[in-house]
Image (cartoon, grey):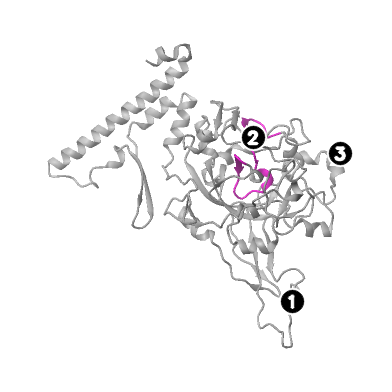
C-alpha cells in the first residue's frame, strides 16, 4: 500500500525503516498478548499475585497517570524482552534512532503553560507543583520614545530604564519595581537586550529551518506547540544578562559595554520543547564526529555586523542532549505567548547561562562538527585578561580563544534595601529601631546559593543572613 501510494518516494531506506518499525510493533503486541494470557491463566488457576507474575519483563504499556487526591503523578515504563533485538533493527535508520530515544524517555504530562487561577503547573517528576505568576502589567500603547524608530509598533512598559537611548531598546526595570514584582517577574518588567530592531514575525508564518541533521525540515510553531516534536514543558528559569551591575565595574575601569544597573536579572516560567527531544525527532540521540555542535541563528539582516547580519551562537552537542539541562525551544513566558522584545514567536532558553547565549526570534538551527563562526559568537560576551583591551584583542586574536567565552552565570549578589543614597537616622525622635536589609543572589551551572553574609563595619566582621529559596520546593518536586 505504501509503495503504491508513495511511488518513487518510497525509497529502499524508507522500506527498511518501515519493516523495522512494523517488526517492533508486532513483537510488542505478541508480548502483550503473552502477558495477558499469563495473567488470565494465573487467575483461573487460583492466581499468582502481581508480585509473582514478573510484569516488569513482559508488560509493554507506557503510562503516565495523576492522582487527583494528592496531586501527585507516577510514571511507569516497561518493555518486552524482545526490545533489544527490535531496537537493533530500528537503529539502522535516523527515523528509528529518534523513535528509540523517545521510547527510552518516561512519558510526562503536558505542561503547556496554561494558567489556572493565576498558577502554572511546572514540569516535575516526583510530584506535581504549581507556581503563581504575576499580572502582565503590559503597556497599552506605544511609548512616545519609540515613535519614529524601527520599533514604533512595540508596546513597552513606561517605567523601564533605557540604557542606550531611544534605540535599540536595552532596558531594565527600576530596582524597586523588580523587588516589588516578587520572585517571578512580569514579562513587561523583564530585562531586554536588543542589538537592533525587533523583527516582525508571526506565529502562523514562522518556520524553524533545520539543517545538518539526518532529517532536515522546517518546523512550524503549531508543530512545536502540539507535542508532536516532543513533550511541551514549563520550567522556571532565572535570566541574567552577563553585564548585570556593569555600571559599578565601569566606575572602576571603563569597559566597552554600556552601564547595566543591578536589575538585569529576572525569573520567568518558560514553556516550550526540550532541545534534546527536538534533536531525537530529527534523528540525533548521541554525539558523533559530524554531530558535535548545535548552532542557532536569528533572522538574517537583523543586525549591521557579521556576514549575514544575524545574531548566532552554538552549544556543544553533549550539553544539548543532556535532559537535565532543560535547554528549551521556548514559545511562552509566564503562560503567555512570547512578546516581541522577548523573542516572539520562538527563542532558545539555556538555564544557568547568560542571556547572550540565548537566541531570540530563532529562525535557523543546524548541527555541525565545528562551533559557530557567527560574528556575535566571537565578539560578544567574552571576559579577557585585564591588560587586553578591544584593540589588542583584535590585533592578537584574543576574541577567538575559546577559554575566554562566557557561558555559565558567575555568582553575584546585590542589595535591594537599604536603597542607594538612603538615609537611616541613628538618633533623635526620628531614629529607626531596626533597618531592613535585603537583596538577591544567583549562580549558574546548576549550583545553589547556600549562604549570604552581610557586613555592617566595612568588612571587618560578617553576619549570616536568612535566605529565602522558592526554588528548593521545585527542585525537590523535580527529583
Nearer to the camera, 58 or 457: 457
Viewer can see residue 162: yes
Q: CA distance from mark 1 to mark 3?
A: 45 Å
128 relative to 389 in the view: left or right: left
Q: Is residue 256 left or right of residue 446?
A: right
Label 2 neighbour load within 10 Å: few <14, some 14-19, many 20+:
many
Q: Is residue 422 above or below residue 369?
A: below
Where's residue 234, x and y in %?
51, 48
Looking at the picture, does residue 293 appear above or below residue 171? above
Image-quadrant location for residue 48: top left
- Please state the horizontal and vertical placement of residue 129, each as a whole percent of the image: 45, 55
Q: Which residue is mark 2?
A: 295
Asked if residue 479 shows in the view, the reply is: no
Read off the magenta span. 344-372
| Residue 395 marker | 3
Q: Is 358 a magenta residue?
A: yes
- The residue sitting at 74% across, 39% down in the picture is 376
The chief SS type of the magenta part is loop
| Local secondary structure at mark 2 | strand
Amino acid at each position: 500500500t505504501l509503495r503504491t501510494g508513495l511511488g518513487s518516494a518510497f525509497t529502499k531506506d524508507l522500506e527498511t525503516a518501515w519493516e523495522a518499525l512494523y517488526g517492533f510493533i508486532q513483537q510488542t503486541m505478541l508480548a502483550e498478548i503473552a502477558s495477558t494470557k499469563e495473567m488470565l491463566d494465573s487467575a483461573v488457576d487460583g492466581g499468582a499475585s502481581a508480585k509473582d507474575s514478573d510484569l516488569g519483563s513482559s508488560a509493554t504499556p507506557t503510562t503516565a497517570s495523576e492522582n487527583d487526591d494528592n496531586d501527585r503523578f507516577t510514571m511507569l515504563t516497561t518493555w518486552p524482552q524482545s526490545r533489544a533485538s527490535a531496537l537493533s533493527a530500528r537503529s539502522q535508520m535516523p527515523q528509528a534512532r529518534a523513535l528509540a530515544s523517545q521510547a527510552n524517555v518516561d512519558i510526562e504530562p503536558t505542561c503547556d503553560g496554561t494558567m489556572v487561577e493565576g498558577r502554572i503547573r511546572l514540569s516535575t517528576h516526583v510530584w506535581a507543583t504549581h507556581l503563581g505568576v504575576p499580572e502582565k502589567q503590559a503597556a497599552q500603547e506605544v511609548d512616545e520614545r519609540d515613535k519614529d524608530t524601527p520599533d514604533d509598533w512595540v508596546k513597552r512598559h513606561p517605567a523601564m530604564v533605557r540604557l542606550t537611548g531611544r534605540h535599540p531598546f536595552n532596558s531594565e526595570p527600576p530596582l524597586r519595581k523588580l523587588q516589588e514584582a516578587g520572585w517571578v517577574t512580569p514579562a513587561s518588567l523583564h530585562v531586554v537586550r536588543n542589538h537592533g530592531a525587533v523583527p516582525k514575525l508571526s506565529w502562523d508564518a514562522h518556520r524553524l529551518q533545520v539543517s545538518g541533521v539526518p532529517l532536515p525540515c522546517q518546523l512550524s510553531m503549531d508543530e512545536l506547540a502540539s507535542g508532536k516534536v516532543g513533550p511541551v514543558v514549563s520550567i522556571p528559569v532565572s535570566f541574567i544578562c552577563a553585564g548585570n551591575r556593569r555600571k559599578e565595574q565601569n566606575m572602576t575601569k571603563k569597559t566597552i559595554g554600556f552601564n547595566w544597573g543591578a536589575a538585569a536579572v529576572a525569573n520567568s516560567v518558560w514553556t516550550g520543547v526540550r532541545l534534546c527531544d527536538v534533536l531525537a525527532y530529527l534523528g540525533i540521540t548521541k554525539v558523533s564526529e559530524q554531530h558535535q555542535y548545535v548552532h542557532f541563528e536569528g533572522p538574517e539582516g537583523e543586525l549591521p555586523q557579521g556576514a549575514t547580519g544575524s545574531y548566532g551562537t552554538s552549544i556543544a552537542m553533549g550539553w544539548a542532549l543532556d535532559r537535565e539541562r532543560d535547554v528549551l525551544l521556548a514559545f511562552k513566558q509566564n503562560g503567555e505567548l512570547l512578546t516581541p522584545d522577548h523573542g516572539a514567536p520562538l527563542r532558545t532558553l539555556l538555564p544557568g547561562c547568560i542571556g547572550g547565549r540565548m537566541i531570540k526570534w530563532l529562525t535557523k538551527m543546524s548541527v555541525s562538527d565545528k562551533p559557530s563562526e557567527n560574528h556575535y559568537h566571537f565578539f560578544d560576551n567574552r571576559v579577557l585578561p585585564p591588560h587586553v583591551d578591544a584593540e589588542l584583542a583584535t590585533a592578537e586574536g584574543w576574541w577567538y580563544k575559546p577559554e575566554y567565552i562566557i557561558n555559565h552565570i558567575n555568582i553575584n549578589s546585590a542589595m535591594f534595601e537599604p536603597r542607594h543614597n538612603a538615609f537611616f537616622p541613628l538618633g533623635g525622635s526620628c531614629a529607626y529601631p531596626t533597618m531592613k536589609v535585603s537583596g538577591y543572589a544567583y549562580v549558574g551551572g546548576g549550583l545553589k546559593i547556600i549562604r549570604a553574609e552581610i557586613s555592617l563595619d566595612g568588612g571587618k566582621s560578617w553576619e549570616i543572613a536568612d535566605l529565602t529559596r522558592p526554588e528548593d520546593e521545585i527542585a525537590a518536586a523535580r527529583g
